[in-house]
Image (cartoon, rainbow, N blue to C red):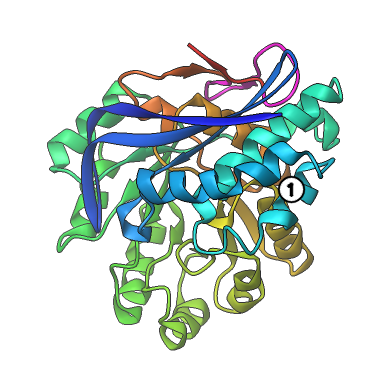
């Protein structure tokens, strides 16, 4: 068993802006696990908002290399548990390792990941396509560039309702709104009335992650369902979100990989909550991994590779009508 990793810069087609950052290039860490002729690939992007850098991800992986290569684990779940304490402050690095472990493990089993999990790929919900914050003409231009049945609109400006009203003039697509913690409870409740009339399906993370009192009010009075993102990072957050949100958006990188992500999804389902998996601006490695578990979900946001000007990998092909997986077992993504 050999563990290695390297960094790729992912150039974006357009500047991507959300409530707390903008970027034109996203750097990502790609992990390789090699055993004989088989290679498992995993990925995690850096993220300044969560303090995840190439340097600290590299450092924590280097310190865990002996455990990985020692081979005293037989499944990705066992490896994840071995690293639970080690990666406590760096779930992004653990995600990349866990993803690579699942890729290698299911290749050794001679199955695609969704086959191993006994999931039906025809059950995958249609992903949304994300429109970042920009001038209204540029946001409209991005929609015209990619015709899609569901758009996720990033908000967090002083003119949020006006933006949605203007975008609605140009499409009949379903809208999903992501405020990235930018609103107050009163704003979210007030906006939900107008947004419902504008064909918005749900609001994602309207308030700051720790504004629990505000979320009680939003949950009670909002005209739209609310989905947790920043408020639901790790497994212990799922139960905390019950009664405050109608559903959760699991980000594999923030949770620490596929292993904890699956646990969070199943727990949310047991509580009667809607489930969603979201992505970062990732290559086809991370996006293809998400696609394999997407049959479990009510909603999915796996458009990250579609936002790239150049993808260092190939993998799942996504259209509004279907998701086509690459040949081969495991997760199936390959480096170009």
Quadrant position of the N terminus in the picture: top right
Q: Which residues are the magenta region? A: 316-331
Q: Quadrant of residue 119?
A: top right
Front in this rendered view, residue 286 or 275: 286
Front in this rendered view, residue 190 or 24: 24
Is 323 one of the magenta-colored residues? Answer: yes
Q: Residue at x 42, y 18 (%)?
A: 312
Left or right: 122 in relation to 220 = right
**In this view of the protein, can residue 22 be seen by the observer?**
yes
Whether residue 253 is situated above or below residue 88 in the rendered picture: above
Q: Which residue is mark 1?
A: 79
Left or right: 92 in relation to 276 = left
Whether residue 209 is situated above or below residue 82 in the rendered picture: below
Q: Secondary structure at mark 1?
A: helix
Q: Position of residue 300 (x, y in %)?
A: 56, 43
**In this view of the protein, can residue 124 be seen by the observer?**
no
Q: Position of residue 184 (x, y in %)?
A: 30, 78
Q: Position of residue 196 (x, y in %)?
A: 41, 60
Q: Residue at x 68, y 60 (%)?
A: 264
Q: Position of residue 32 (x, y in %)?
A: 58, 28
Q: Main secondary structure of the magenta part?
A: loop
Q: Residue at x 45, y 48 (%)?
A: 59
Is 80 one of the magenta-colored residues? Answer: no
| Badge 1 density bin: few <14, some 14–19, many ≥20, Cα 10 Å | many
């Amino acid at each position: 068993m050999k563990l290695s990793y390297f960094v790729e810069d992912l150039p974006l087609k357009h500047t991507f802006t959300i409530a707390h950052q903008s970027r034109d290039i996203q750097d990502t860490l790609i992990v390789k696990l090699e055993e004989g002729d088989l290679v498992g690939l995993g990925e995690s992007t850096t993220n300044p908002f969560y303090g995840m850098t190439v340097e600290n991800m590299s450092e924590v992986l280097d310190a865990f290399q002996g455990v990985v290569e020692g081979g005293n684990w037989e499944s990705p779940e066992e490896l994840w548990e071995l690293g639970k304490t080690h990666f406590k402050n760096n779930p992004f690095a653990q995600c990349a390792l866990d993803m690579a472990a699942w890729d290698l493990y299911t290749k050794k089993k001679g199955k695609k990941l969704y086959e191993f999990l006994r999931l039906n790929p025809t059950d995958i919900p249609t992903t949304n396509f994300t429109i970042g914050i920009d001038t209204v003409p540029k946001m409209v231009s991005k929609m015209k560039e990619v015709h899609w049945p569901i758009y996720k609109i990033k908000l967090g400006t002083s003119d949020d309702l006006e933006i949605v009203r203007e975008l609605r003039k140009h499409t009949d697509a379903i809208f999903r709104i992501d405020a990235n913690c930018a609103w107050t409870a009163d704003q979210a409740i007030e906006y939900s009335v107008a947004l419902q009339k504008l064909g918005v399906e749900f609001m994602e993370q309207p308030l700051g992650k720790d504004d629990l009192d505000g979320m009680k009010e939003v949950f009670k009075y909002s005209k739209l369902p609310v989905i947790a993102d920043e408020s639901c990072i790790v497994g212990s957050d799922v139960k905390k979100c019950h009664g405050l949100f109608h559903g959760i958006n699991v980000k594999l990188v923030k949770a620490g990989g596929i292993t904890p992500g699956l646990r969070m999804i199943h727990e949310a389902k047991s509580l009667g909550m809607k489930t969603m998996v979201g992505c970062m601006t990732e290559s086809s490695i991370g996006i293809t991994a998400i696609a394999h578990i997407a049959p479990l979900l009510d909603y999915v946001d796996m458009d990250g590779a579609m936002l790239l000007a150049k993808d260092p990998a190939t993998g799942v092909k996504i259209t509004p009508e279907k998701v086509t997986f690459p040949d081969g077992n495991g997760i199936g993504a390959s480096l170009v």
